[in-house]
Every structure is written in C-alpha cells, then in structure tokens.
Image (cartoon, coloured by chain):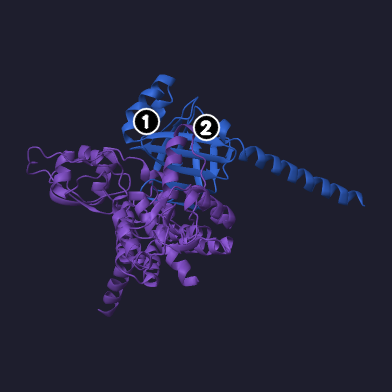
Amino acid sequence: MQKKTKVIISVIVAIVVVLGGFYLYASHSVARHVPGHVYEYTSISGNQKAYMTFAKSGDEVVVTPSRDKALKANDSDSAFQSVYQDEADQGKWNYEAKGSKLTLSKTQDNKVSLWQYNHVLAFGKKIHSSSFSYQIANAGQGVDRKATNFEQIR
Amino acid sequence: MKINNKKRLAAVFMTAVLAGPVLASSVAMADNATGSPAEQADITNWIANTPQQVSNNMVMQHIDMNNLNGTRYIIQWGDTLSSISAATGISVAKLCYDNNIQNANLIYAGDVLILNRNGDVPAGYNPNVNPNAVAQTRVTINNGPKTVNIYAPKSVKKIYNEQVDNLKTDDHSNNSENNAFAAPADAKNSTSDNQQSQQSTDSTSDSESDSQESSSTSAKTKTRNAAATNHGKHRSSSVSASAIVSGLESAAGDSKLSFEEGDGGEDAEQVDVDSAVILKAAKKGDYAKVLSEIKDALGDKAKDGTTVYIEKDGNEINVYAVESDNSSSKDSNKDDEDSDSQSNDNDDDSNSQATNDNQETDTTDDDD
C-alpha cells in the first residue's frame, strides 16, 4: 500500500472517529445540559415561542410563554418554586432527560400530556431534536418527524 | 389613453402580487387554530396564553377591545377562559353564560366565542368549568401511528400509567368514552356509536349484520380504527362458549355428560367453577383440564343424563348443570341469552365487554 493511500485512509478514519465521537457526546448529553438553565423553544410553525426553566435539581420545569417569568424562575431555588407554584393552576410541568430523549409532561385535572423530543443533539447552547412524540390528554397521540430547536438563553 | 389603461392594469396587478401574501398571512395569523398535526400537537399550543397574548390575538382579528357587544372571537390555541376573561374584563361566568359553556372544562380552538360586556349573569349561575384549561381540539390529532412509547417523568408515572391502562381497557372494549388520548368530541361520537351498536346487538338476532355494523361504526375515526385493531387482536386470542362446548365434547369422549351452549334455562343450577382456570385452559386448548375442573365442581351431579351448559359473560365463564334432559330449556336458551345481555346494561365496563364478546361468539359461529 502506498504511503499516500495510508494517509488518506488515516485521515478518513480520524474524521469518522471525531464525528462519531461528537455525535455520541451530543446525543447523550441533554441530561447534563438542561438542569438549572432557561431555554427558548421555537414552535414548528416558527411563530410561537415558549420558555422553559429547568430546576437545578428534581424534575420540575417552568414552561411559560413569558420570557420574564422564565428568567425570574432561574434567579434562585426559592424564585423557581415561587413561579412554579404560581403557574401550577395552568398545569404542573415536569421533565425527564435521558439518553437522547427529552420528555416534558403537563399534569392538569389529574390528566397527563407528554411531549418527547427524540434523537436530541445538545451542543453548546443549542439543542436540536429531529422528531417528537406526543400523547396529549383529550387531544391525540402520534409521532412527527419535524425538527425542533431549543436555545439556551441563560 | 391605451397606455394609461395598461399602466393602471399593471399597477393593480403588481399591488395584488405584493400585497396578497401580506393580506393572506394576516388572515392566517388571525385564525391559527388549524394546521398540520405536527403544528397542532406542538407544545406551544398547550401552554396557557397570557392575557397579553389573548389581547394580541384579538387585535389580529380586528376586534375593538373598547366595544365588546356581541363581538365574535375565534378561540386560539393556548387560550383559556381565565386569560380571555383577564384580557377582556368579562367574567368567566359571563363568558360561560353567553356561550352556553357548562359542565365541561372545555373550549375548543377554532370555535367562536361571543364577547359581550353588556348584561348580567342570573343569580346563582355557577358554571362547572376549569377556567385554566387550555382550548382543546374537536378532532383527534394523529398523523398515523397508533401506539406511541414515551418515557414519562418519574413523578407523573403513576397517573400516566393509570391513563394508559384505561386506554388499553377502552381499546379492549371498543369504547373510547374515557379514551385519554382522543378528542372529547370524537369520544362522544364513539360512545353513541357504541351504544347504537350495542342496541342492535341486543335487539336483533342476525349476528352477521351486528358484527358488520359494529365494525363499520368502529371505523369512523382514526382512534376508533386503533380500537378496532386491538379488538381484532383480542378476538383471535379469546375463546367462545361454542368453542368450549365443542372442545369439551371431544375431551369427554363417551362420558356420561353432554354439553350445550347457554345457561340451561330455569331448571339449571349454576356450578361453582373457577372461571379464570377454565378460560386459561380453554385458551391453551387444554379441554381435558376444563373437563376435570367442571367434573370436580359437579361432584355427585356428574352422572348419566346431566347436561352441562356453558355461558360466556364478558370475561367470565358460567357453567350450569341440568340433571335430566330438558328440551324446553334448550329451546328457550337463546331468548334467555338475549334477556341476560339486556339485564347487564347497568354494568358500565363489563356491559360493553359483554356486548363485544357476544359479537365474538357470533363471529366464531359464523366461521364454523
């Protein structure tokens, strides 16, 4: 085998290893990324925003259309609890980040609705999901292969 | 002059081309209650809107907030009665009274809500609503998949599991009245369809038309399709009374006992058997075990001339015995079955199950 061929193969292998490593890291780090941070979510249609403040510990999350409330909830643990309880009338939100999945749940009137973001890649301040599954109380369930994005704002 | 006309025409055309998309998007944003399943299921639609967002929506619909006198507002995703109330200054009770919203927590995205600041609510009017429930959908959101696997957060797992269990039960009984993941309007239609199907099963003797009607009504919505699919799965694994009777006949061989389907009429005495054991053994095709269970329960009655009657009531197997041949009871057997299935109408869950199982029995008979 010529030296040039060996170099080319080595470079290709190195690129594959780096990309594979990056993918492995990004696809399994959502659980490390979200606690204690505020994310801005953009709807599939692109004309709606939601803000999510993930608790530093535990599985509670404040989900609100108000950026101010979301940021306020991230000020301290007591501020988080205060906002979380204030918003509880509109439904209690919880989350689970595991592997490459991020699940958000809303509980209201003893009924649970779930949105699970699949194939999540988390890197830097961005979280990207290539599909989501949903089970919405009194509404429906299914899987949609639409990409969604979250951006850390604090 | 001709040139001027051409210029005017071109100007109108260009204006239409340029302004068209702007006007179209304005109309679309004023009524964003529709969209693809993905857009409808988007999480932002299920987060309660703030009063400010509701006000913005009203402005988009060219509603004069200072003159709300029978004004029509198209309910948007995320709207709640409390946020609409806060945005308009109209009380939740007044909104409910003017729009005849009662005994339900639901307003629906895309519906029209009448906003009326004038007039009062009658004393004692107290609508039973949750003003913080977001606008729901009238049509079940689904883009194809019938089963969805989601990892629920630990703290909601218990409630979620109960919900999923209910869903399975509802699918099993082909009744989505309490289907947690179906739109209430769909569920109501399904319930009425089921009632209709049940009535036809009870009142007509033509089993074939019953099962056809049942399957045609169950195919009306996607959710009901899923239920029908699951029902079909159940059908293939369940055992009918007639199948048990024929299984017992071959297992008994030249035994003294004879077997019939039904409850044996008035002369029959119920035999105390373990229904679960019989059903399990019958499903495995182990009719020797079924026979042994029945013989043990019969004790001294297991003698010549005793006829054993097998009846399936939902998931229960009832066994009756008549010690001497009684043709009259045999003849009246079908009538008794009908009256029994009617008398079960008070049981909510077992009722619909029993209806379906009757259908299963009928279908099996047809196959035979």
State left or right for residue A46 relative to residue B342.
Answer: right
Q: Nearer the viewer, residue B191 or A102?
A: B191
The mark closer to the camera, 1 or 2, is 2
Instruction: Name the N-terminal-most of marks 1 and 2.
Output: 2
Quadrant in which the N terminus of chain B is drawn:
bottom left
Q: What's the distance in space between the residues labelled 1 and 2, CA to CA?
A: 18 Å
Residue located 34% across and 31% down the image? A88
- Colour used to depict chain A in the structure image: blue
Residue B108 screen position, x and y as percent = 28, 50
- Chain for numbered disc 1: A
Q: Is residue A147 visible?
A: no
Helix, strand or loop under label 2: loop
| Discs 1 and 2 share one subunit | yes
Q: Residue furthest right?
A: A1
Give the chain coloured purple. B
Q: Where residue B165 appears, x then y in whole percent?
A: 45, 44
Q: Name the chain letter of the residue that bears numbered label 2.
A: A
Q: Which residue is mark 1?
A: A68
- Residue B196: quadrant of the picture: bottom left
Residue B269 shows in this picture? yes
Could you classify mark 2 by the number of other residues whose Cα lies within 10 Å: few (under 14), some (14-19), or many (20 or more)? many
Q: Report helix, strand or loop for mark 1.
A: helix
Q: Which mark is residue A129?
A: none
Q: Which residue is found at the position 41% from the left and 24% from the top? A: A80
| Residue A11: x %, y % from top left | 80, 46
Per the image, the residue denoted by label 2 is A34
